[in-house]
Amino acid sequence: MSRNASSDSRPVSAIWGGRFASGPSAVMEAINASIGFDKRLYAQDIAGSKAHADMLAACGILSQEDNAAIQEGLDRIREDIEAGRFEFSTRLEDIHMNVETRLRERIGDAAGRLHTARSRNDQVATDFRLWVRDAMDHIQGLLRDLQRVLIDRAEEHFDTVMPGFTHLQTAQPVTLGHHLLAYVEMFGRDRSRFRDARARLNECPLGSAALAGTGFPIDREQTARALGFDGPMRNSLDGVSDRDFALDYLSAASICAVHLSRLAEELVIWTSAQFGFVRLPDAYSTGSSIMPQKRNPDAAELVRAKAGRVIGNLNSLLVVMKGLPLAYSKDMQDDKEPVFEASDTLELCLAAMTGMVEHMMPNVARLRESAAQGFTTATDLADWLVRELGTPFRDAHGVAGAIVRMAEDRGVGLEDLTLEDMQAVEPRLTDEAVRVLTVDASVSARSSFGGTAPSRVREAVREARRRFLETEDT
Ligand code: ARG
């Protein structure tokens, strides 16, 4: 495209060019056009126009014949687009003008009446809301799929012991099932965030017109209902200029992407040779072109990286919106790409994570061995002293600490010390105290509500199925 293309040679837009003597320069056309991305709104745009035309006809603003021609014409356009027979034109700027221009070619003058009591401002606000609402509904299913595989794997590993970490330092033994169920909770909150956002989104801007409403006797309730909204938005200025629903979507998407990224990070760590906790199947690993031994967890790394994009998209739109006075500004045309990109990215990441979790192969023996390393049952010893001897916890902590130091000095694990060794620190210790030092005893003891004990994990698996998989919503 030449930057110097003469503006005079270009035709003026048939839709808004009444007051213009010449058309836009090539650069103006390039920066102004949104059709390259907003064609993704075609189904919503057509649904919005059909609802609007029906309402105009019901209110006596449009004749029944014109409405019939419009309905029929829009249906055919939708078919053409879906069959790949529609040629989108940059000259026609956006999806709204592409569809309307084509409608005019098909049905003639009646098409020109469709835009009565409407503006592209309330039109795009409506289309975009409908699109984001669909995206919110779709994500529910993807999150549920991921929760399902996490719950299945948690059930399978309800008593598989592994080290639990704080500061990425071995802390106390936990069960793998418990660890996986932690993510089920996170993704459950994500679902509820998308649900909340959907409820707030579900008011219809159509009928706000350019910004001030319209003098035509329209029925906003009718269009709102026809498009599945709870009702019309209450303020026309807000109707055309609000993009909170997109920000809500991107916020929920960003938090969800953060959860995916944390799980991805765990997979990256767990699949390293040094940890060796988990192996990813070939389908989710790649090799190295130079190092034959390598098995890289690329999918997990990319899920971790792509969280950055989703967060970036939220940031983009926040910055677009922060300086805009009421009502519509063209800046708002730049609201779509961040949302489309975030949605594509998040959906791909959810699918990749679901596949990885479903097919990952935990190394149960290695997890168990690692669970005992690093004196992970020292707290159990302290707890025993409190429980059986009435020692105050702070003192018990000191005793257990001294025993850990003894094991560390000798280069052995806690379970390798004899009762006599330990009695040198606390003479009242018994065989029973030695038994609490096993990792199985340790996890079984943590049977408080929400704890890691296998009995609790089994119960939590049942509850998670009921809470997240047997619910009605999408
Ligand atoms: N393509 C535009 C957008 O996405 C449609 C609204 C245009 N409105 C206007 N007043 N120029 O925002």
Image (cartoon, helix red, strand yellow):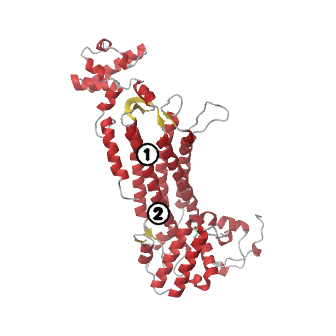
Disc number lying in front (1 or 2): 1
Quick one: quadrant of the N terminus?
Answer: bottom right
The answer to whether one can see residue 426 in this image is yes
The C terminus, quarter of image: bottom left
| Marks 1 and 2, the one that precedes in the sequence | 2
- Please name the amino acid that badge 2 sits on: Arg
Relative height, residue 107 to residue 4 (above, below): below
Which quadrant of the structure image shows residue 149?
Answer: top left
Amino acid type for the residue under numbered disc 1: Val
Mark linked to residue 120:
none
Question: Which of 9/129 is in front?
Answer: 129
Residue located 41% across and 55% down the image: 193
Give residue 113's position: percent from left, percent from top: 56, 83
Quadrant in which residue 234 is drawn = bottom left
The answer to whether the residue labelled 1 contacts the one labelled 2, judged by CB atoms less than 8 Å apart, is no
Q: Is residue 44 above or below residue 317?
A: below
Residue 24 locus on image (x, y percent): 71, 72
Q: Tell me the quadrant of ligand 1.
A: bottom right
In the image shown, does 432 or 386 lie closer to the viewer?
Answer: 432
Q: Is residue 316 above or below residue 419?
A: below
Image point (40%, 43%), residue name: 152
User: Which residue bears the numbered disc 1?
Assistant: 149
Residue drawn at x 28%, y 21% as measured from the top left = 433
Q: Secondary structure at mark 2?
A: helix
- Element at label 1: helix
Label at residue 133:
2
